[in-house]
Image: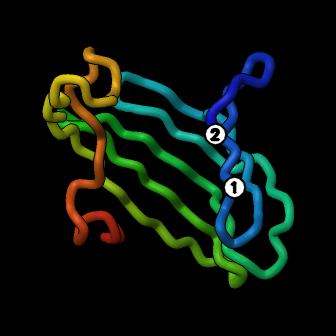
Amino acid sequence: MLHPDGERVLVEHYCAQGNQARLQLVAADADGLRFGELDATNVGTSSVMVELVLRWTADGFDQITVYRTPAGERERDTLHFVRQPVEPPAPGASSAPASSTSRLVPASPSAAGAST
């Protein structure tokens, strides 16, 4: 979840492992955003997110996450999201607003789990 906090921008990541990492914006330019570790709650013995990069691409964006393991090692994963055209709804069908012509989806099942 992205949100303002006074003069800064934060990301709160509610992890399936049960912890909640907070990251703050540390760099922003025309190519994307980079968030770095601020703090985390309920970490215990689980891995915790310490960096998030959103990098704009010609067809969507890359989401790069870095986790710190309990042993102190860093694990990095990249998801590539691409825009796909959305078919217009059938007449009378419930749908997204008419102005919605595309959606972001993982590039492919194999790419979605790829690590870099």
Foreground pick, 7 / 89: 89
Q: Is residue 106 left or right of residue 32?
A: left
Q: Is residue 22 left or right of residue 112?
A: right
Q: What is the three-letter code of the residue carrying label 2?
A: Met
Q: Name the residue located 70 percent from the left edge and 45 percent from the top edge.
A: 12
Image quarter (top left, top right, bottom left or bottom right) of the C terminus: bottom left
Pointer 2 with pointer 1, Cβ within 8 A: yes
Residue behind mark 1: 14
Image quarter (top left, top right, bottom left or bottom right) of the N terminus: top right
Q: In which quarter of the image is residue 99?
A: top left
Q: Residues within 10 Å of mark 1 (few under 14, many from 20)?
A: some
Q: Where is residue 96 in the image (x, y as percent from the top left)?
A: 34, 27
Say what secondary structure mark 2 lies in: loop
First of labels 2, 1 by sequence position = 2
Foreground pick, 109 / 116: 109
Q: Name the residue located 61 percent from the left edge and 34 percent from the top edge.
A: 26
Residue behind mark 2: 1
Q: Residues within 10 Å of mark 2 (few under 14, many from 20)?
A: few
